[in-house]
Image (tube, rainbow, N blue to C red):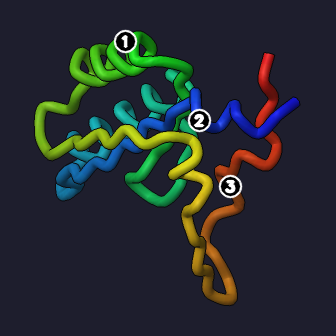
């Protein structure tokens, strides 16, 4: 397999900021986060999720689902980057990260 697959695939980066002062707001945050996970996104950081997509049609579909499931309050932003650009991300981690999930393309399986 050649390294050219990285140029065809893209990543959608979803950044969201939602109020969490009340129990209802925390519940909406949890529901939106569960939607992201069910839709195939992986946590990069708290309130930052990433999803691998294969083409612009998949991007449009993913953005449509985000719009349909958007929270009533808060801000959701989506950034599309190539897999090649995503692979250049530099991770700077302290001594004790508070999460055990890391999203990299090192174990990417192309079917």
Question: Residue 42: x and y, percent?
Answer: 57, 41
Dot in front, 1 or 3: 1
Along the line of sight, the residue nearer the viewer: 74 or 82: 82
Q: Residue at x 35, y 33 (%)?
A: 32
Residue lying at the far bottom of the rendered structure:
95
Residue lying at the far right of the rendered structure:
1
Q: Classify mark 3: helix, strand or loop.
A: loop
Residue at image mark 3:
101
Question: Residue 58: x and y, percent?
Answer: 45, 14
Along the line of sight, the residue nearer the viewer: 107 or 54: 54
Q: Is residue 106 above or below residue 1?
A: below
Question: Residue 64: x and y, percent?
Answer: 28, 15
Q: Is residue 54 above or below residue 42?
A: above
Q: Earlier in the sequence, mark 3 or mark 2?
A: 2
Residue at image mark 1:
61
Q: Earlier in the sequence, mark 2 or mark 1?
A: 2
Q: Residue at x 12, y 31 (%)?
A: 72
Along the line of sight, the residue nearer the viewer: 97 or 89: 89
Figure quadrant of residue 88: bottom right
Along the line of sight, the residue nearer the viewer: 3 or 16: 3
Left/right of residue 60 with respect to residue 76 in the rendered view: right
Q: Is residue 45 above or below residue 49?
A: below
């Amino acid at each position: 397999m050649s390294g050219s697959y990285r140029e065809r695939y893209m990543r959608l980066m979803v950044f969201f900021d939602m109020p969490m002062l009340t129990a209802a707001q925390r519940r909406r945050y949890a529901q939106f986060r569960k939607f992201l996970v069910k839709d195939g996104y992986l946590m990069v950081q708290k309130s930052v999720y990433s999803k691998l997509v294969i083409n612009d049609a998949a991007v449009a579909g993913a953005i449509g689902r985000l719009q349909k499931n958007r929270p009533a309050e808060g801000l959701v932003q989506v950034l599309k980057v190539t897999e090649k650009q995503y692979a250049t991300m530099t991770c700077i981690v302290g001594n004790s990260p508070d999460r055990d999930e890391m999203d990299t393309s090192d174990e990417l399986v192309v079917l």
